[in-house]
Image (cartoon, helix red, strand yellow):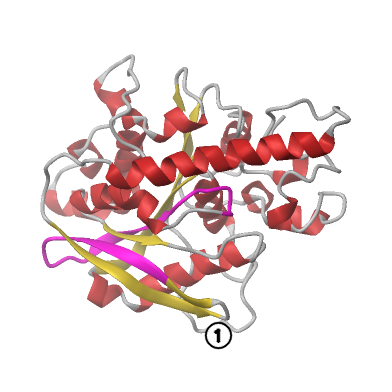
């Protein structure tokens, strides 16, 4: 099963009880991240300038805000959109403060966003907000010390799905009707996605597991399930994509990113999957080796020109744990949602 959730047998007749159990699992997981991640203590590093509560787009329900983490120095730096998880229904940008700060310490201007949540706002509201955030980053590139030609996205779980979708979408796909043709691009140059569901087209036809977000079952809303699936848009020249995933994740089975990586490679794209050995959905969030791999992958593809200019390989400045050790051992001293 490559669906979003495969915790309980789908053939059970007690569908209502099953749905309640699944929702409790999702909410329990997300609530634990809300409590734990903001208090994560980072190692000492270069000073970071933080600008909190900046408006990046206005919706009928109100203004959406972001927190910006900028490295010291003139720049411009690569940009990194940071997208929280929470099953598309809970959470906010503060969950990923540690991750955003980590990217800033490594020479990225990181922009952690809050976005509209289900069931009040269903898909495609969430991807529209992510697209708006990337356009805002490009529109304010000078003030934020961002190189507009080098913007990546990092997300975990629901956030991983959103950045992966941003990576495979063309600018005209799922475009908001009021966005002018000459608006800045919402395309990413690198995708870093953890715990990400990648293809909702394979979910059981009558499952209501994510109806609160997609508006119904797959049989009732086949087009929406396709539109929400990053795998549905794969083509040649998609940006390099790095996935990391818990080996024993039962909330989002690892088969989902495995299939995504396979399809990307078949299309001729660059894609990697880092498996967090012996870890589930929650544990993989804190896998330090995965984060180091993600940073190295981003450096390789977003700092290539800097490496040529300095005569060094930027990816080697922050080597991934798997590159330092032949048999990397997962550490839970860092991560994201």
Residue 301 showing in the rendered view: yes
Q: Is residue 118 left or right of residue 237?
A: right
With respect to residue 172, does 258 lie above or below? Answer: above
Provide the residue designation for mark 1.
Answer: 180
**Residue 204 lies in quadrant:** top right
Residue 336 showing in the rendered view: no
Q: Is residue 228 left or right of residue 268?
A: right
With respect to residue 250, does 170 lie above or below? Answer: below
Q: Which of the image's four quarters has the N terminus?
A: top right
Residue 167 lies, in percent from the top left, at 52, 55
Name the residue: 60% across, 44% down.
267
Residue 19 lies, in percent from the top left, at 74, 39
Mark 1 Cα-neighbour bin, 10 Å: few <14, some 14–19, many ≥20? few
Residue 255 lies, in percent from the top left, at 63, 29
Q: Is residue 127 left or right of residue 103?
A: right
Report the magenta residues as a range: 65-89
With respect to residue 230, does 78 lie above or below? Answer: below
Name the residue: 81% across, 42% down.
207
Name the residue: 59% across, 40% down.
26
Q: Which of the image's four quarters has the C terminus?
A: top left
Taking the magenta stretch, the answer to whether it contains residue 297 is no
Q: In this orientation, which residue lies closer to the viewer: 51 or 36?
A: 36
Q: In this orientation, which residue lies closer to the viewer: 14 or 275?
A: 14
Residue 64 lies, in percent from the top left, at 45, 72
């Amino acid at each position: 099963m490559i669906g979003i959730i495969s915790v309980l047998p789908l053939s059970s007749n007690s569908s209502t009880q099953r749905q309640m159990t699944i929702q409790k699992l999702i909410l329990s997981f997300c609530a634990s991240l809300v409590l734990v991640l903001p208090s994560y203590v980072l190692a000492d590093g270069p000073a970071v300038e933080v600008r909190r509560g900046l408006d990046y787009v206005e919706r009928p329900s109100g203004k959406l805000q972001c927190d910006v983490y900028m490295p010291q120095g003139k720049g411009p730096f690569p940009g990194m959109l940071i997208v929280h998880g929470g099953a598309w229904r809970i959470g906010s940008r503060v969950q990923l403060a540690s991750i955003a700060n980590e990217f800033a310490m490594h020479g990225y201007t990181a922009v952690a966003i809050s976005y509209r949540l289900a069931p009040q706002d269903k898909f495609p509201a969430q991807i529209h907000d992510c697209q708006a955030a990337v356009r805002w980053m490009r529109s304010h590139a000078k003030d934020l010390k961002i190189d507009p030609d080098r913007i990546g996205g990092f997300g975990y779980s629901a956030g991983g799905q959103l950045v992966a979708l941003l990576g495979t979408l063309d600018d005209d796909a799922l475009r908001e009707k009021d966005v002018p043709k000459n608006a800045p691009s919402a395309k990413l140059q690198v995708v870093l996605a953890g715990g990400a569901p990648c293809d909702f087209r394979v979910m059981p036809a009558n499952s209501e597991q994510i109806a609160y977000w997609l508006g119904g079952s797959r049989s009732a809303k086949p087009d929406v399930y396709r539109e929400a699936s990053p795998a549905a848009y794969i083509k040649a020249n998609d940006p390099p994509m790095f996935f990391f995933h818990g080996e024993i994740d039962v909330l989002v089975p690892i088969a989902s990113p495995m299939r995504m990586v396979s399809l990307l490679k078949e299309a001729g794209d660059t894609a990697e999957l880092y498996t967090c050995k012996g870890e589930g959905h929650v544990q993989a969030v804190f896998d330090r080796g995965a984060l180091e791999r993600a940073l190295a992958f981003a450096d390789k593809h977003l700092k290539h020109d800097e490496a040529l200019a300095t005569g060094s390989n930027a990816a080697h400045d922050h080597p991934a744990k798997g590159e330092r050790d032949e048999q990397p051992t997962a550490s839970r001293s860092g991560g994201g949602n």
